Image (cartoon, rainbow, N blue to C red):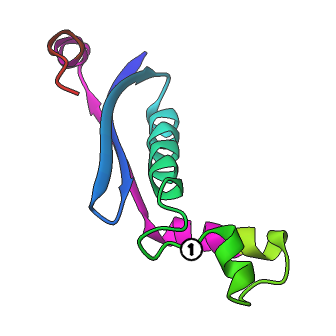
Amino acid sequence: MKYFIIRGGCFNIDEDESVTATIDHNAAVNEAYEMACESYDSYAGLHGIMSEEDYIEEGEAENFDEAWELYREDRESTVEYEAIEITAEEYKTYLEEGIL
């Protein structure tokens, strides 16, 4: 088992941070990516982030599939995420002290 601090968010205004225990760095990065996507998705339709419906209403997409593709492309270009490996001792300290 490996231990990581994971961070994910969007726009440098909404970044979540957590610790995780997982099998490898790729799994931790995937978890951070999911965290970032959840952050982005929570702003859909707000603060200039278009929702799938917005793409259709604005005439940029003709159907949900096209709108989803545009939404996904915007999300991919906006989210930021990372996984930083830490020691088992650091992981334990973070959990015990509730730092993250």
Look at the image and tell me in which quarter the C terminus lies. Answer: top left
Which of the 4 image quarters holds residue 1?
A: top left
Few, some or many residues within 10 Å of mark 1 (<14, 14–19, 20+):
many
Residue 25 in percent (x, y) is at 44, 35
- Who is closer to the viewer here, 8 or 63? 63
- Who is closer to the viewer here, 29 or 73? 73
Question: Given the current orientation, which residue lies at the most extreme bottom position?
Answer: 59
- Who is closer to the viewer here, 85 or 15? 15
Q: Main secondary structure of the magenta part?
A: helix
Give above or below for 79 relative to 32. Answer: below
Magenta stretch bounds: 70-94
Give above or below for 6 relative to 79. Answer: above
Any magenta on residue 87? Answer: yes
Taking 10 as reference, is 91 left or right?
A: left
Q: Which residue is mark 1?
A: 50
Residue 39 in percent (x, y) is at 44, 51
Residue 21 in percent (x, y) is at 41, 20
What's the residue at 16%, 13% (across, down)?
93
Amino acid at dot 1: Met
What's the residue at 49%, 37% (across, down)?
31
Taking 63 as reference, is 19 left or right?
A: left
- Who is closer to the viewer here, 94 or 38? 38
